[in-house]
Amino acid sequence: MLESLRKDIEKLISLYEAEKAERMRLQSLLDECKAENEARGKQIGDLEQQVNNLQLSEAFGAGADRAGAKEKIERLIKEIDKCVSLLDK
């Protein structure tokens, strides 16, 4: 009976060690996935910013006519300043 109990305890310890190793492996995998997810999120943010910049430059025609685009932006800024000054009155 004592020998049977000893074997059962050894078996439980062995199973525990196996589960512990599996848990550590899964935790490591989870950490890797979290880091990759964070990197992908940053990459998505950067790409979205690039898309926004391209859309803005296309809207002002900055690709072909930088001087014209600059003029449009300056006009918009003046218009915004005028609106702000009207709101301050």
Image (tube, grey):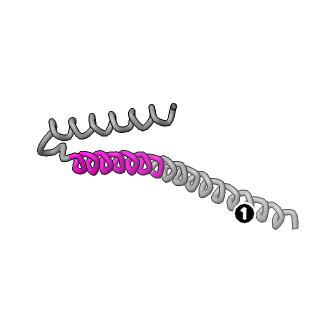
- Is residue 19 toward the left or the right of residue 28 in the image? right
In the displayed structure image, the side of residue 26 where residue 47 appears, left or right: left
43 over 18 or under it: above or below: above
Q: Is residue 59 magenta?
A: yes
Residue 4: image x %, image y %? Answer: 81, 67
Residue displayed at 35% across by 46% down: 49
Q: Position of residue 11 (x, y in %)?
A: 72, 63
Q: Residue furthest right?
A: 1
Quadrant including the N terminus:
bottom right
Relative height, residue 11 to residue 72 (above, below): below
Q: How many marks?
A: 1
The residues colored magenta run: 37-60
**Residue 33 part of the magenta-drawn span:** no
Percent across and percent down for residue 14 are 68, 59
Q: Residue at x 34, y 38 (%)?
A: 79
Near mark 1 (Cα within 10 A), the count class, few <14, some 14-19 or many ≥20, is few
SS majority, magenta: helix
Q: Secondary structure at mark 1?
A: helix
